[in-house]
Image (tube, grey):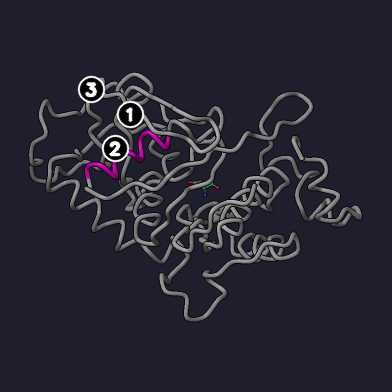
């Protein structure tokens, strides 16, 4: 059955250029493109390159090349002049993230954390698979939502103060009703690292809001992150988009396809003579 037309539908594909794209990324992005096109809506391309140490310019170029070869096209993006919501590189949008952080600080929803842990380093990446943020034990957490004390000399990151025991529910476009409990399924998460790098959670919410995204299509390993992000929308008093979580693609050993699977990169598949059509035929459920 054809979908009702919705010219206000705005979707996005948001690759992180830490390597070449593989078939699993393409499957999620393809769903995002289909959902936008089926509704007569718009699709934008945003490059999520805040993790400067890992995002290399050659991967950015490679990513755009792979997407175009595969048959993706977008209505707004870094390569299209006159796109309304430029810049489309997260690395060029830091002041927007800082503004949102300052708002969260001013309402007492963020606090300084002096703990130095691996999850603070990891916070700039979308937490796929087993690298999700650990539940923060609350060492630096102030008891109430209060204005924070003057900066200490020690280095610190900013964490979001997650309310205890709140049920965060949403209706997923594919999975139906989903629910997570804050403080149990996830804890106080990093908003901003000590080295002035915003976290994935903060950056993605600010961008999806500012770019007027109406539906986020992403892999289902980000379900818990969606719950975190819903709390950010709430704190910032922004309307949240709808969500559609795609199944993950696994390798033969049952591991999620990741950038390490070089043989399944679109580039390698293309060099091996595969076409976008033949790659799509191998996706489950197509
Ligand atoms: N750039 C993120 C990734 O590649 C996108 C995640 C999201 O859809 O929010 O994992």
Does the stretch in magenta take in 227? Answer: yes
Residue where numbered disc 3 is placed: 164
Can you give x and y, in whole percent of width and height, for residue 142 in the image? Answer: 13, 29
Mark nearer the N terminus (3 vs 2): 3
Residue located 54% across and 27% down the image: 130
Q: Is residue 34 left or right of residue 205?
A: right
| Residue on which the image places disc 1 | 168
Q: Residue at x 30, y 22 (%)?
A: 183
Horizontal side, residue 160 vs residue 208: left or right? left
Q: Earlier in the sequence, mark 1 or mark 2?
A: 1
Residue under label 2: 231
Q: Residue at x 26, y 50 (%)?
A: 238
Q: Is residue 129 above or below residue 193?
A: above
User: Could you tell me residue 174's position as x and y percent?
Assistant: 55, 35
Element on which disc 3 rests: loop
Q: Where residue 5 appears, x then y in whole percent?
A: 53, 58
- Tell me whether the residue at label 1 lies in contact with that at label 2, contact meaning CB atoms closer than 8 angstroms: yes
Q: Secondary structure at mark 1?
A: strand
Circle 1 or circle 2, nearest the eye: 1
The magenta span reads 225-235
Helix, strand or loop at label 2? It is helix
From the image, which quarter does the C terminus lie in?
A: top right
């Amino acid at each position: 059955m054809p979908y009702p037309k919705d010219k206000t539908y705005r979707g996005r594909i948001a690759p992180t250029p830490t390597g070449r794209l593989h078939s699993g990324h393409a499957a999620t992005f393809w769903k995002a493109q289909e959902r936008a096109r089926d509704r007569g809506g718009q699709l934008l391309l945003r490059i999520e390159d805040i993790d400067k140490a890992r995002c290399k310019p050659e991967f950015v170029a490679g990513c755009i090349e792979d997407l175009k070869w595969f048959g993706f096209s977008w209505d707004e993006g870094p390569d299209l002049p006159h796109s309304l919501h430029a810049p489309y590189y997260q690395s060029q949008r830091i002041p927007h993230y800082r503004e949102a952080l300052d708002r969260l600080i001013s309402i007492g929803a963020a606090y300084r954390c002096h703990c130095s842990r691996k999850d603070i380093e990891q916070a700039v990446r979308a937490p796929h698979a087993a690298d999700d943020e650990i539940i923060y034990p609350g060492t630096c957490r102030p008891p109430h939502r209060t204005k924070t004390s003057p900066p200490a000399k020690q280095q610190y990151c900013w964490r979001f103060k997650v309310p205890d025991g709140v049920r965060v529910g949403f209706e997923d476009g594919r999975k139906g009703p989903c629910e997570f409990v804050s403080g149990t399924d996830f804890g106080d998460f990093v908003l901003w690292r000590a080295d002035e790098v915003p976290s994935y959670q903060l950056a993605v919410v600010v961008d999806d809001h500012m770019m007027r995204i109406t539906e986020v299509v992403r892999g289902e390993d980000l379900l818990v992150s969606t719950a975190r992000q819903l709390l950010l929308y709430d704190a910032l008093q922004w309307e949240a988009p709808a969500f559609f979580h795609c199944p993950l693609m696994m390798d033969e050993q049952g591991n999620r396809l990741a950038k390490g699977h070089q043989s399944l990169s679109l580039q390698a598949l293309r060099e091996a003579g595969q076409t976008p059509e033949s790659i799509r035929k191998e996706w489950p459920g197509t």
